[in-house]
Image (cartoon, helix red, strand yellow):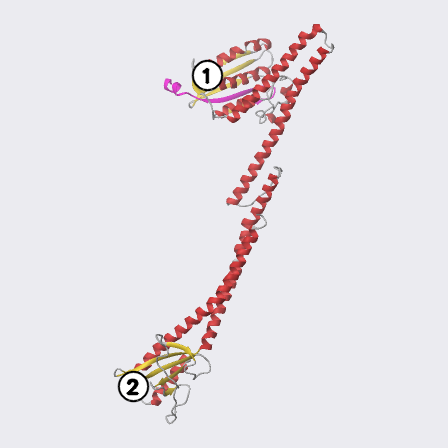
Amino acid sequence: MKKTLYLKFLLAYLIFGIFGFIVVCTFSPGMVRDHYVKDYAERFRSEGNLIANTYASELYNSEVSLDTVKDQLDALSLYMDASIKIINPSGRVILDTDKALDVEKIVYVDNFDSTVAGNSYYTIDRFFDTFDKQVLTVMVPINSNFKVKGYVVFHYPMDKIEELSNQLTGIFLLTFVVLFLLSMIILIFFTEIVYVPLRKITHATEQYASGNMHYEFTVDSDDEIGYLAACLNYMANEIARAEDDQKKFVANVSHDFRSPLTSIKGYLEAMLDGTIPPEMHEKYLGIVLNETERLTKLTNSLLTLNNLNTKGMLLEKTDFDINNVIRGIAASFEGSCLKKKIAIEVILTGEEMYVNADVEKIKQVIYNLLDNAIKFSHHNSVITIETTEKKNKIFVSVKDTGIGIPKDDLKLIWDRFYKSDLSRGKDKKGTGLGLSIVKEIINSHNENINVISTEGVGTEFVFSLPMSKHQKKED
């Protein structure tokens, strides 16, 4: 397509020009010639009727002399550039503007026939062989007392009409050529506005088809082609980003699976070959168990993310008390908090606060946020969970006073497997998928989650949920 579309358009343009030229050359001369013939014939017939009703009629009624009529017709012949005759029905030439008046010399038109024109009022011939070349002849009868006394005959050379026809045809051809050349502007516009951008788009699609998703191109246009190019660029960027994410995803999964598997294999081999004595087996079996739990947690997290991606909007929404959910989850972390001497402060709006959401998934969100807060909080610190109401929305805040998140990492924390440099030492069992799951769940509810963090001071996560209709009625 890329090598033929322009050629097809150019070929169509040339065919149009050639056929247009042929049509003008073929039909224009005949049409122009017919136009001039009819125009002159009509003019001669009109003038012939005037002569037949005035000078010729008066001549046959002996009201004017032949010399007078000759002088008048000579002047009219000169004006109309045509030859004028008065001929009797017998074919005798009474008067001829091309010759001097000679009453003693009798001239006849051999085989004269007034009906030679048939149904037409003009003929194109040599007028009974009285001319060497073809002439346009118009005959108008001279009537007197309901009888045809003679004919007023006009002759006009056809070569003059052909000359006029050729001149006008030449003008037509010149006009067509000028228009054809001017129409090349359309070809230029097509080349610059359509063909060149289309070539760029085609080349880009070839690059993308070959796997080069990082190929970039620009089309400076505000029309549909420019929009198509922009969409194609955006699509390629998204695919490239998805491929990069996929590579990163595979690398992270491989790394996170390899580390515990390596530990498990190493400890088991050490126990089998006696490097670890039997009395130490229980300790290292505990480590192996922790590593298997880590693998189980990673696998479950991956399955959760996969389900969220494929069924993101398939939520089992119900009305439930978010305050009661928060109290229950906070109580479940009592053991973890005691180890680090962390206090959980719960500040809830009202005794009951009903929201409309998927209760199990929201529990997972709060669990993950609270689990992260405990991991990255200092000993003897406080974690605050708070709910507030605003414009039919319930906002849930989980705030800690831990290590915080570096400013450069704030936009990356939602990425799968991402762990900031500050968290790596404290989050040895983390999968890097917790916040990705949180983001997916909140987005699937068409709600938002935001983070506010200062390195060395602490972090606060805030997400919104829609207030249930039951709660609105109570308010």
Residue 399 sits in which quadrant? top right
Callout 2: SS? helix
Q: For this rendering, which residue is in front, 80 or 107?
A: 107
**Residue 413 placed where, x, y %?**
58, 24
Q: Is residue 445 left or right of residue 420?
A: left
Residue type at the position of mark 1:
Ile
**Residue 48 placed where, x, y %?**
34, 79
Does the magenta segment cover residue 8?
no
Q: Is residue 148 above or below residue 253?
A: below
Graded by Cα atoms within 10 Å as few (under 14), some (14 to 19) or many (20 or more), the crowding at tag 1 reads many
Q: As drawn, which residue projects farthest toward the bottom?
A: 104
Q: For this rendering, which residue is in front, 316 or 215?
A: 316
Does the magenta segment cover residue 460?
yes
Callout 1: SS? helix
Seen at 53% across and 52% down, the residue is 190
Graded by Cα atoms within 10 Å as few (under 14), some (14 to 19) or many (20 or more), the crowding at tag 2 reads some
Seen at 60% across and 39% down, the residue is 209
**Residue 255 placed where, x, y %?**
65, 22
Instruction: Mark yes or no: residue 354 visible.
Output: no
Q: For this rendering, which residue is in front, 112 or 144?
A: 112
Which mark is first along the chain, 2 or 1?
2
Q: CA distance from mark 1 to mark 2?
A: 123 Å
Which numbered disc covers residue 58? Answer: 2
Which numbered disc covers residue 322? Answer: 1
Q: Is residue 96 above or below residue 44?
A: below
**Residue 317 placed where, x, y %?**
44, 21
Q: Quadrant of the C terminus?
A: top left
Region rendered in magenta? 453-475
